[in-house]
Image: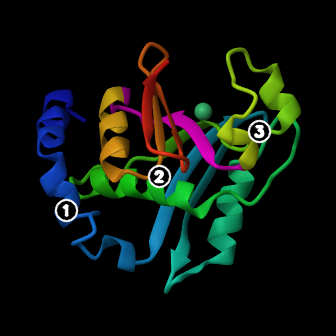
């Protein structure tokens, strides 16, 4: 992927979102899929599945996504927020509208309170412990562009960790910060 191309696309974001994943388009009426990858002690894990269709959660795809987004350290999975999955789906949908089909490389999904407490700089009330937040990146896509897409989607909180090249999204109140 070409960074300049992507940045040019980003400049047209509002119009693009309106036509591809915005309220006026039919993006959200179609089956919603998610493509997640994660490196764990088991190697590279991957889920590419539909998690929502015809107005309801699709159990197989949804549970597979929840498993991948588990607390790896504690070996615990929870039911993740569907709105959170929608935010990730929206980011992927935006990029796919431009022919960029790219997996979401996950660094963190659900965190048990103990795992969360062990992470330096993590807030105690982290949305991760409620299964409502995701940290990660996409190969070849600048984190600040991902943050812009996530911000336009208005699904919740967006944290941009530019130095470390990753993004935090959650389904909480709309807010933006840099870490
Ligand atoms: Zn986070």
Report the span colored magenta. Answer: 131-143
- Tell which quarter ligand 1 is in: top right
Residue occupying image coordinates x 49% and y 18%: 179
Quick one: which residue is furthest to the bottom in this view?
A: 54
Q: In the displayed image of the protein, which residue is found farthest to the front?
A: 173
Q: What residue did someone put label 3 on? A: 111
Query: Residue 78 location in percent, x, y?
Result: 79, 55
For the residues marked 2 and 1, what is the alpha-carbon distance in whole angstroms?
17 Å
Indicate yes or no: mark 1 CB to ligand 1 under 8 Å: no
Report the front residue among 19 and 170.
170
For residue 104, side relative to residue 113 (left or right): left
Q: Secondary structure at mark 1?
A: helix
Real-space CA distance between mark 1 and mark 3, rounded to the nearest whole angstrom: 34 Å
* 10 Å crowding of disc 2: few (<14), some (14-19), many (20+): many
Ligand 1 under 8 Å from disc 3 Cβ: no
Q: Which residue is mark 2?
A: 88
Which colour scheme appears in the figure?
A: rainbow
Residue 7 horizontal/vertical position (percent): 17, 33
Q: Vertical placement of 102 versus 86: above or below?
A: above
Task: Name the residue tied to disc 1.
Answer: 18
Residue 169 pos. (x, y %): 51, 41
Q: Quadrant of residue 15?
A: bottom left
Residue 138: within the magenta?
yes
Rendered location of residue 115, percent (x, y): 83, 30
Image point 82% across, 24% down: which residue? 117
Measured Cα–Cα span from mark 2 to mark 3? 18 Å
Q: Quadrant of the N terminus?
A: top left
């Amino acid at each position: 992927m070409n960074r300049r191309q992507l940045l040019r696309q980003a400049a047209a974001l509002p119009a693009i979102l309106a036509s591809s994943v915005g309220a006026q388009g039919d993006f959200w009426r179609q089956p919603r899929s998610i493509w997640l990858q994660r490196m764990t002690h088991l190697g590279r894990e991957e889920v590419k599945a539909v998690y929502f269709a015809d107005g309801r959660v699709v159990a197989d795809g949804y549970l597979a996504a929840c498993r991948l987004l588990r607390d790896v350290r504690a070996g615990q999975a929870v039911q993740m927020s569907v709105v959170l999955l929608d935010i990730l789906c929206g980011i992927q949908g935006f990029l796919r509208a431009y022919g960029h089909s790219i997996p979401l490389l996950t660094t963190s999904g659900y965190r048990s309170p103990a795992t969360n407490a062990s992470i330096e700089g993590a807030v105690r009330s982290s949305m991760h412990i409620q299964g409502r937040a995701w940290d990660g990146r996409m190969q070849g896509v600048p984190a600040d562009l991902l943050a812009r897409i996530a911000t336009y989607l208005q699904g919740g909180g967006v944290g941009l960790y530019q130095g470390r090249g990753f993004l935090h999204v959650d389904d909480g109140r709309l807010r933006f910060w840099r870490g």
